[in-house]
């Protein structure tokens, strides 16, 4: 019987294992961690957002410049098909008010538990604490194990090793030099869905008193290096070094690339996005009597707490005392960012095996019989179910590709 080695026990690797084992192939799955699916489990701690219910073309567009290379994978295993597959595991899903799709229990653990039970029933063999070291001179797979080193042979290999973020969970990018040695074209791994650092850093007061607090319902806009305007509305979190949170993550790719091209990028923050400039001006200019500026802005414009602190951080005392200048700052507060947070802190990573290095079945052109899936491919997407969906889809395509590859060699 033909055998396939799958290296990496995240959603992409597990999906490839399912496809291959259902196709009658003996599957050995290896993972460097003590158990599989660790990043998947952690991603589900705040609520397991599996995918999104929006129209398919809109869904595909969320992958930005990678949309056209991701589209065939999603056509092969669409968000709707993913939901059907999850329901087939006995896990109910529901669509939230934002259109995001969640398991009924809002957790990853029940889904992973029943999935692993199915895979073991299909005969998949799991080998944990196996760190892949590439190939030996005879072409066998090399693994570092607690006892030393182990060598394994397989008729085909699926690599699903993740990107470069969250190394403590196994996604450390250590595979990059191993494939580069085989001539595989790889784009540098970069942080995606990540935090950003403010130029010059925050003052000790702002950092010490407000780090970790949310800036609720704000909008941001900026112009990228190509001259395109980006605008978003949502929630930021003020971090000790700059900003984190879903709003900044949603534009992390153009922010990152603009900083790389220009050295910095200036955001314009709208601290009162639901009010016009004219209304804010009227509220700020309203006589405040004996009230402090903070009390006045809180009662008239809804500016308080961390928003007020941020205004004081960026504006001078003189500027704050001028109503028109203050109103314009509330609607367009300039904050300059000059760096991303480190790759290992990012939710996900960009870069990886370039799509020109693989064929339509995700097999490496220069290493026949070796397939790649998941985040180790050169694509990125925002949070909201897009990351997971593409990992599942690419794992399925790679698994089918390996299955067809072996069928052609019987």
Image (cartoon, rainbow, N blue to C red):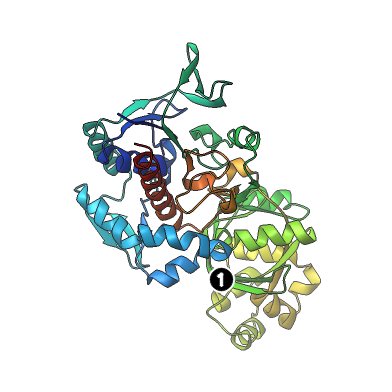
The image quadrant of residue 112 is top left
Q: Residue at x 79, y 58 (%)?
A: 263
The residue closer to the viewer here, 292 or 39, is 39
Label 1: how many Cα within 10 Å (few below 14, some 14–19, many 20+): some
Q: Residue at x 60, y 40 (%)?
A: 344
**Is 376 left, or right, of 403 in this rendering?**
right
Give the farthest residue toward the top: 147
Check disc 1 and report its element: helix, strand or loop: strand
Residue under label 1, please give it.
232
**Is 117 left, or right, of 157 in this rendering?**
left
The residue closer to the viewer here, 104 or 314, is 104
**Where residue 31 appears, x then y in whole percent?**
44, 29
**Where residue 199 appears, x then y in whole percent?**
76, 56
The residue closer to the viewer here, 239 or 91, is 91
Q: Residue at x 78, y 73 (%)?
A: 319
Quarter in which the C terminus is drawn: top left
Is residue 280 something that shows in the picture?
yes
Quarter in which the N terminus is drawn: top left
The image quadrant of residue 312 is bottom right
Q: Please count the marks in the image.
A: 1
**Where residue 19 appears, x then y in whole percent?**
31, 43
Is residue 290 something that shows in the picture?
no
The image quadrant of residue 272 is bottom right
**Is 82 left, or right, of 268 in this rendering?**
left
Q: In this rendering, is residue 127 above or below 275? A: above
Q: Residue at x 52, y 79 (%)?
A: 274
**Where residue 127 appears, x then y in whole percent?**
38, 24
């Amino acid at each position: 019987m033909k055998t396939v080695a799958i290296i990496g026990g995240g959603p992409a690797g597990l999906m490839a294992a399912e496809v291959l084992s259902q196709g009658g192939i003996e599957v050995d799955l290896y993972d460097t961690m003590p158990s599989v699916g660790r990043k998947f489990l952690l991603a589900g701690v705040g609520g397991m957002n599996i995918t999104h219910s929006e129209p398919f073309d809109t869904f595909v567009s969320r992958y930005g410049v990678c949309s056209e290379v991701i589209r065939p994978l999603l056509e092969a295993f669409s968000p709707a098909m993913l939901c059907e597959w999850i329901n087939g595991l006995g896990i109910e899903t529901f669509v939230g008010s934002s259109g995001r799709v969640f398991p009924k229990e809002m957790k990853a653990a029940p889904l992973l538990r029943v999935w692993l039970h199915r895979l073991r029933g299909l005969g998949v063999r799991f080998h944990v604490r196996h760190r892949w070291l590439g190939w030996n001179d005879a072409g066998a797979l090399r693994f570092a194990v607690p006892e030393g080193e182990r060598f394994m042979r397989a008729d085909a290999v699926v690599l699903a090793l993740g990107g470069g973020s969250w190394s403590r969970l196994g996604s450390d990018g250590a595979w990059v030099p191993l494939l580069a040695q085989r001539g595989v074209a790889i784009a540098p791994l970069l942080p995606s869905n990540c935090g950003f650092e403010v130029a010059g850093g925050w003052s000790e007061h702002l950092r010490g008193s407000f780090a970790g607090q949310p800036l609720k319902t704000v909008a941001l806009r900026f112009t990228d290096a190509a001259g395109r305007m980006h605008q978003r509305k949502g929630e930021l979190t003020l971090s000790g070094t700059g900003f984190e949170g879903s709003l900044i993550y949603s534009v992390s790719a153009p922010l990152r690339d603009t900083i790389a091209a220009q050295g910095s990028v200036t955001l314009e923050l709208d601290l009162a996005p639901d009010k016009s400039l004219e209304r804010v001006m009227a509220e700020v200019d309203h006589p405040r009597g004996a009230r402090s500026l903070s009390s006045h802005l809180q009662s008239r414009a809804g500016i308080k707490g961390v928003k007020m602190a941020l205004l004081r951080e960026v504006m001078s005392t003189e500027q704050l005392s001028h109503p028109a200048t203050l109103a314009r700052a509330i609607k367009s507060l300039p904050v300059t960012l000059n760096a991303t947070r480190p790759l290992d802190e990012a939710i996900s990573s960009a870069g990886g095996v370039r799509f020109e290095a693989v064929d339509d079945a995700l097999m490496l052109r220069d290493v026949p019989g070796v397939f790649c899936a998941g985040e180790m491919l050169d694509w990125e997407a925002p949070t909201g179910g897009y990351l997971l969906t593409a990992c599942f889809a690419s794992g399925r395509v790679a698994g089918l590709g390996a299955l067809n590859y072996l069928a052609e060699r019987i």
